[in-house]
Image (spheres, rainbow, N blue to C red):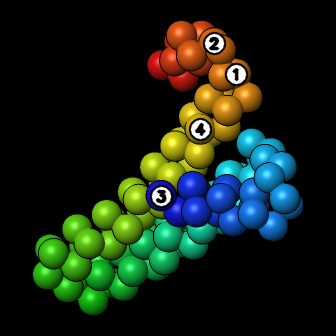
């Protein structure tokens, strides 16, 4: 969703021109989630917080780890629009 918003805002700013590499900016956002999740996880483990704090911190980290995978699949789908079967074979 955020990567679609970033791509649509890029298209509006550049008068309808779209580059698939625009979606790479989402990786910086996911890095922030990963770093924040790991810092929060460290505090949760150090201070012996309840298990729900550890689970929430891990969920933030995993969200940040999943986003680059989604971005790379979307970039491949946009670059190779007519070879979806090859793309799914390469990613799996």
Gap between marks 2 and 1 measured at Cα: 6 Å
Percent position of residue 18, x then y: 78, 47
- The residue labelled by disc 1 is 80
N-terminal of the pair, mark 2 or mark 4, is 4
Which residue is rendered at x = 81% and y = 67% of the image? 13
Secondary structure beneath dot 1 equals loop
Secondary structure beneath dot 3 equals loop
Secondary structure beneath dot 4 equals helix
| Towards the viewer: 26 or 8 | 8
Mark 2, other Cα within 10 Å: few <14 / some 14–19 / many ≥20: few
Gap between marks 2 and 3 measured at Cα: 24 Å
Would you say the residues marked 2 and 1 are in contact, meaning their CB atoms lie under 8 Å apart? yes
- The residue labelled by disc 3 is 1
Would you say the residues marked 1 and 3 are in contact, meaning their CB atoms lie under 8 Å apart? no
N-terminal of the pair, mark 1 or mark 3, is 3
- The residue labelled by disc 2 is 83
Percent position of residue 28, x then y: 66, 65
Gap between marks 4 and 1 measured at Cα: 10 Å
> In the rendered image, which quarter is residue 91 located in?
top right
Would you say the residues marked 4 and 1 are in contact, meaning their CB atoms lie under 8 Å apart? no
Secondary structure beneath dot 2 equals loop
Mark 1, other Cα within 10 Å: few <14 / some 14–19 / many ≥20: few
| Towards the viewer: 14 or 81 | 14
- The residue labelled by disc 4 is 74
Q: Residue furthest bottom?
A: 47
N-terminal of the pair, mark 4 or mark 1, is 4
């Amino acid at each position: 969703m955020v990567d679609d918003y970033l791509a649509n805002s890029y298209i509006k700013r550049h008068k309808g021109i779209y580059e698939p590499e625009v979606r790479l900016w989402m990786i910086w956002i996911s890095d922030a989630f990963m770093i924040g999740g790991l810092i929060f996880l460290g505090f949760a483990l150090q201070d012996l917080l309840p298990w729900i704090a550890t689970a929430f911190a891990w969920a933030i980290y995993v969200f940040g780890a999943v986003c680059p995978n989604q971005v790379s699949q979307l970039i491949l789908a946009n670059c190779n629009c007519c070879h979806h079967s090859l793309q799914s074979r390469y990613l799996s």
